[in-house]
């Protein structure tokens, strides 16, 4: 790992209609051709093959865990014994749905498309991400990953807003904005930024979904009033707050502290080795360089893909803790100098970075 | 005026797979279906100009390798986001073990 300070001229403009949007297009960073490791077609076909079996197995376990934890939370409601049940329920609701909407949105989790669609809709509701808006924003994220002015899904902008990062471990900032967006969409308004990535013919669908969700939340709140109990909201809505911690913890590692405005996922994405429970919750998205380089590969084949191409990738970060040990100091440095980032070192067996393509001309370099 | 152009040998493409074919500055995708029929479409996804020959063939669907957009390669119909515009298809015939496509 090398830390680099580059010599960009002025602060970044992250809006999707601003100066950096124009610059990204002018500099060839928008919809560019990205680096990918060469894999023989035969092996790539094997990796891309779809199967219902792994996702059905995982989804049965996932839904069963929902039912058991919800039942325990309801049964023990009013005593401290409900806490561990709601901890599990909340983590499933507010965190595991992040990876489910993502994988099913790519259409890779199941071979059978209606299964992808069903879990996608359910997970989007729980994670409070409009299934139409986020399908298209994620398309842009894959086209222009961490390209300033183009990528609508940059989790930590520079200089980092650390208060926002901390609040999001409790879902506060994201859920607030999700509710505002839902109300705005339900009122029939698509924002200027949304219009840059949602095709016109898809926009009415985003409005329809927002209205359905709004009705569900009204019904849940009405039930809570009727029962004189917080319990309905503990099951629908609030878990997005008290269960968000895991998806934020893993999500920040995807690109946090790494380069922006480059067209090589080895520079702007991070693969992190982690424990089996986190990998179940996260559906193997810890193999994030691999996922971005080859989004056609289903989550269950990512470990095999990792083994196949690791000679061409930076060494994976060995743990979640190790990831935070490199990322937090980088965030703190970016408070003083937003051009600072961590440059991933490649093994000798890897093809080198195309330095001429990347906006990382160093003025100061320090080995870590 | 249409021309039949030789693209490849029939055995060059595996069953349920796709191959890229470039001709006269244009790029095409040639498909072999699971029931051993051949089809041809424009080679680039209508969404963001990615080569479909790097994608995955499943039954009568080609899935784009970049954003997982789906087309029916037999009809060219767009079948799943983020693709919204249909793919152009071309007639194909097999002659003496060669795949020929009619490029309009």
Image: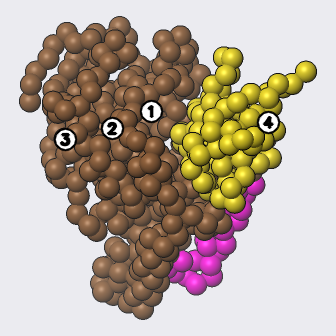
Chain colours: A brown, B yellow
- For the residues labelled 1 and 3, the Cα–Cα distance comes to 20 Å
Residue, disc 1? A145
| Mark before the other along the chain sequence, 1 or 3 | 1
- For the residues labelled 2 and 4, the Cα–Cα distance comes to 40 Å
Instruction: Give a yes or no on whether discs 1 and 3 share a subunit.
Output: yes
- For the residues labelled 1 and 4, the Cα–Cα distance comes to 34 Å
Q: Nearer the viewer, mark 1 or mark 4?
A: 4
Query: What x and y, as percent, mark residue B41?
Result: 73, 37
**Contact, CB < 8 Å: mark 4 with mark 3?**
no
Please tell me whether the stretch drawn in magenta is mainly helix, strand or loop: helix
- For the residues labelled 4 and 3, the Cα–Cα distance comes to 45 Å
| Mark before the other along the chain sequence, 2 or 3 | 2
Residue, disc 2? A269
Could you tell me if residue A290 is visible in this image? yes
Residue, disc 3? A315
Query: What x and y, as percent, mark residue A224?
Result: 58, 77
Give me the chain letter of mark 2: A
> What residue lies at 39% left-to-right and 58% top-to-bottom?
A301
Could you tell me if residue A334 is visible in this image? no
Stretch of the chain drawn in magenta: A208-232
Secondary structure under tag 1 reads: loop
Badge 4 density bin: few <14, some 14–19, many ≥20, Cα 10 Å: some
Mark identifier at residue A257: none
Q: Quadrant of the C terminus of chain A?
A: top left
| Mark before the other along the chain sequence, 1 or 2 | 1
- For the residues labelled 2 and 3, the Cα–Cα distance comes to 12 Å
């Amino acid at each position: 790992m090398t830390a680099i300070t580059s010599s960009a001229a002025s602060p970044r403009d992250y809006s999707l209609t601003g100066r950096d949007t124009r610059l990204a297009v002018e500099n060839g960073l928008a919809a560019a051709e990205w680096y990918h490791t060469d894999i023989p077609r035969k092996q790539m076909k094997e990796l891309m093959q779809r199967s219902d079996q792994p996702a059905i197995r995982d989804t049965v376990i996932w839904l069963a865990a929902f039912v058991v934890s919800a039942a325990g939370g309801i049964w023990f409601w009013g005593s401290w014994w409900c806490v561990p049940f709601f901890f599990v329920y909340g983590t499933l609701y507010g965190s595991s749905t992040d990876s489910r909407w993502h994988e099913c949105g790519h259409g890779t989790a199941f071979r059978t498309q209606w299964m992808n669609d069903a879990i996608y809709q359910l997970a989007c509701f729980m994670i409070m991400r409009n299934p139409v808006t986020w399908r298209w924003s994620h398309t842009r994220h894959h086209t222009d990953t961490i390209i300033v002015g183009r990528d609508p899904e940059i989790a930590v902008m520079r200089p980092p807003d650390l208060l926002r990062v901390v609040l999001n471990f409790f879902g506060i900032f994201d859920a607030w904005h999700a509710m505002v967006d839902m109300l705005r969409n339900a009122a029939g308004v698509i924002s200027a930024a949304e219009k840059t990535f949602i095709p016109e013919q898809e926009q009415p669908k985003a409005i329809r979904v927002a209205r359905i969700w709004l009705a569900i939340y009204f019904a849940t709140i009405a039930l809570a009033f009727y029962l004189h109990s917080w319990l309905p909201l503990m099951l629908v809505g609030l878990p997005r707050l008290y269960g968000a911690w895991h998806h934020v913890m893993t999500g920040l590692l995807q690109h946090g502290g790494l380069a922006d405005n480059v067209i090589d996922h080895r520079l702007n994405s991070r693969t992190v080795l982690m424990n089996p429970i986190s990998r179940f919750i996260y559906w193997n998205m810890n193999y994030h360089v691999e996922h971005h380089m080859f989004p056609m590969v289903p989550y269950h084949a990512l470990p095999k893909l990792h083994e196949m191409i690791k000679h061409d990738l930076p060494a994976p970060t060995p743990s979640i803790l190790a990831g935070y040990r490199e990322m937090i100091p980088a965030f703190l440095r970016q408070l003083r100098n937003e051009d600072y980032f961590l440059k991933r070192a490649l093994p000798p067996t890897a093809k080198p970075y195309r330095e001429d393509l990347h906006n990382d001309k160093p003025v100061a370099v320090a080995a870590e | 005026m249409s021309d039949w152009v030789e693209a490849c040998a029939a055995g060059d493409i595996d069953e349920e797979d796709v191959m890229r074919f470039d001709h006269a500055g244009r790029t095409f995708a040639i498909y072999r279906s699971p029931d051993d029929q051949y089809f041809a479409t424009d080679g680039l996804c209508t969404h963001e100009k990615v080569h479909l020959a790097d994608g995955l063939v499943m039954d009568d669907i080609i899935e784009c390798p970049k954003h997982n957009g789906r087309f029916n390669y037999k009809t060219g119909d767009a079948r799943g986001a983020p693709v919204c515009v249909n793919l152009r298809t071309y007639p194909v015939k097999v002659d003496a073990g060669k795949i020929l496509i009619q490029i309009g």
